[in-house]
Amino acid sequence: MARFKQRDRSTQRRRIRFVSVVFFGLVFNLLGTTTTTGFEFNGNGSINRRHVLQKCTLVAALGGQVGIKPCLAVDGEFVYSDSWTGTNLPLLPIWEATEESNIVFDDDHDDNATTNGLSCWSMGRWPDPILRRPAQQVPSLLFGTEQLQKACELLRNTAVVNAAVGLAAQQCGVNARIIFLEQQGRRPFLPNNGKTGLVLINPQIIQRSPEMDMRVWREECLVLPTSFRATVLRDAWVDVKFQHPNGKKDQVRLKGETARALQHEYDHDRGILITDHLDLSELENDLMRRIESDGHEQRMQIAYT
């Protein structure tokens, strides 16, 4: 019975999102504007979301669960442009990812004593197929082990080295649902042994703000070409339950920029990128559209649920 109730709630959420987006699409068409009460705009990018929002919510409103389909696979390194070459990282479990052979050291910031020599992971670079692999939950037998603690430290270090406000282990080819969020503002998330930021293991969003309170953000991503930006919808706040490295269960409500960052990394955990929040026509060129086309609508459905 509980399973059917959960499915009903998910279906209801998709329908509410569909109705709200179509309604605002009609308002936009009538008023000829891109702003309306209930939406918060960030950044300087133009926001023309009527077509993509209506299309992706129509797909999501159909209901049902689909398996994620990867984008066009590439063999070896893929040269996208003069300034961007994709990786081809292996998929590693935690116990392999924490071995010395899979750890790198930051030697590119000689003027930064904070990160110089810091041990970290290599990050995937689009269109690496590893970025499309949903991460698996961290098994209970790893909680409280040195391996899991080391994995969390490596993830934190990788975020610091790359100046990331958030990072998922999945982005580094590590098959584990672990997210790091950098501290935003003066107030700490939770007591964290004097360390900044928060590590969430096996995170699960259990409650979201009302659909009409969603926010619009202009986002970029470290695993995507630096020239790419996407305008996306995010919940204003989310309640997240998760575990600490010692196995202790916890729950936190995140708001604003921190909520946005969590949702961005939560997408990575599911093999979703910000490209999946857009219509193919909104991607930056034909090559990106060709690479992203295979399975794009399926990924859009996941991105919007």
Image (cartoon, rainbow, N blue to C red):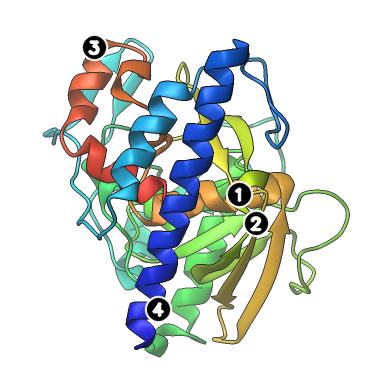
Tell me, yes or no, whether the two marked residues, 1 and 2, touch with CB atoms within 8 Å.
yes
Looking at the rendered structure, the kind of residue marked 3 is Asp
Q: Is residue 164 visible?
A: yes
Which callout, 1 or 3, points at the residue further toward the start of the chain?
A: 1
As drawn, the label of residue 209 is: 2
* Residue 8 position (above or below residue 135): below
Residue corresponding to mark 4:
5
What's the residue at 32%, 57% (across, down)? 101
Mark 3 lies on a secondary structure that is: helix
Give 209 or 270, whichever is nearer the viewer.
209
Q: Position of residue 33 (x, y in %)?
A: 63, 13
Which callout, 1 or 4, points at the residue further toward the start of the chain?
A: 4
Report the side of 40 relative to 5 (left or right): right
Which callout, 4 or 3, points at the residue further toward the start of the chain?
A: 4
Tell me, yes or no, whether the two marked residues, 1 and 4, touch with CB atoms within 8 Å.
no
Q: CA distance from mark 4 to mark 3?
A: 42 Å
Question: Quadrant of the rendered structure where residue 63 is?
Answer: bottom left
Q: CA distance from mark 3 to mark 2?
A: 36 Å
Q: Position of residue 286 (x, y in %)?
A: 24, 12
Mark 2 lies on a secondary structure that is: loop
As drawn, the label of residue 235 is: 1
